[in-house]
Amino acid sequence: MAKAARRSTRTTKAPARDPREAIIDAFLALAAERDVHCIGLDEIAERAGVSLAELRGCYAGKLGILLGFARRVDLAVLAEGPADPESEARDRLFEVMMRRFDALAPYKPAIRRMARSARCDPALAAILRRLAIRAQAWNLAAAGISHGGLSGRVKSGGLALVYGETMRTWLGDDDPDLGRTMATLDRALRRGERGMRMMSDLCSLLPRLAESGRRGRAAATTG
């Protein structure tokens, strides 16, 4: 009976926090305070409450942590499921991209500082652009829009431009309803829709032009 009583008074330990997530949070907290290139790996480890060995076991460096953060945001966007299949493609993209900005909202101070740093740090700018383009493939997938092949790469690149334009507005938009952000995104998507229609026509025309050129060369050779 006494043993049973002692067992009943034991407290259950809370599950240990995932060190990978703690490292991402620590990096973002530091990135809100100073430029990325000024942040040391030892500082990230200390802020996250892990050893350097644990940090290295989770990530190869700051780029790896950024990739981990991008994955976190992608998962948050995709967790809400596909966009409404009954709506138009532009409306589906609008829905998915606004989900992304909602997922980014808790990290706005860090993103704002990184965006400023990227203006004079070409390496950081290239990394952020690569991450933005990669994110668009997931946006297109969640919106139920084809994203494979040459056409998919063109769509991802074009959508990254829309995302970048909207991001600049979002960084300065502190209203809870994000009215300015939504207006910018709507305008950019409408322009992008026209551009993508032209690119789609061009992509369908290129194979025909290539085939016509091959036939011309074959005819010249046999003639």
Image (cartoon, helix red, strand yellow):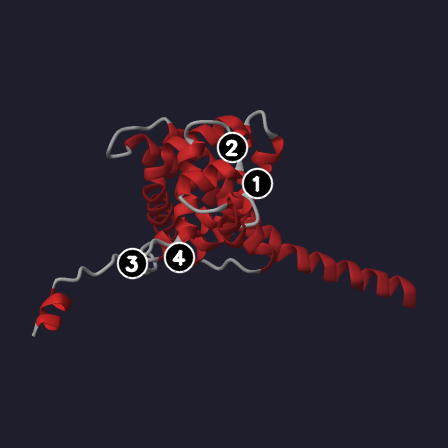
Residue 156 visible to an observer of this rendering: yes
Viewer-proximal residue among 190 and 54: 54
The earlier-in-sequence mark between 4 and 1 is: 1
Quadrant hosting residue 130 = top right
Which of marks 4 and 3 precedes in the sequence? 3
The answer to whether marks 1 and 2 mark residues whose Cβ atoms lie closer than 8 Å is: no
Q: Which mark is residue 15?
A: 3
Q: Amino acid at mark 2?
A: Ile
Pick whichever, 216 or 137, lies toward us.
137
Q: Earlier in the sequence, mark 1 or mark 2?
A: 2
Viewer-side label of 3, 4: 3
Q: CA distance from mark 3 to mark 4?
A: 32 Å
Give the residue displayed 49% in from the left and 51% down from the top. Answer: 54
Judged left or right of residue 93, residue 38 is right
Q: Are the two marked residues, 1 and 3, in contact with CB atoms closer than 8 angstroms?
A: no
> Circle 2 is placed at which residue position?
39
- The label number, if any, that marks residue 2 in the structure image: none
- Farthest residue, direction bottom: 1
What percent of the width, then of the height, locates residue 88?
35, 53
> Does residue 18 appear to the left or right of 221 in the view shown?
left
Instruction: Name the amino acid, label 1.
Output: Ile
Neighbor class of circle 3 (other Cα within 10 Å; few <14, some 14-19, many 20+) is few
Q: Residue at x 9, y 71 (%)?
A: 2
Secondary structure under tag 3 reads loop
**Residue where numbered disc 1 is placed:** 127
Residue under pointer 4: 142
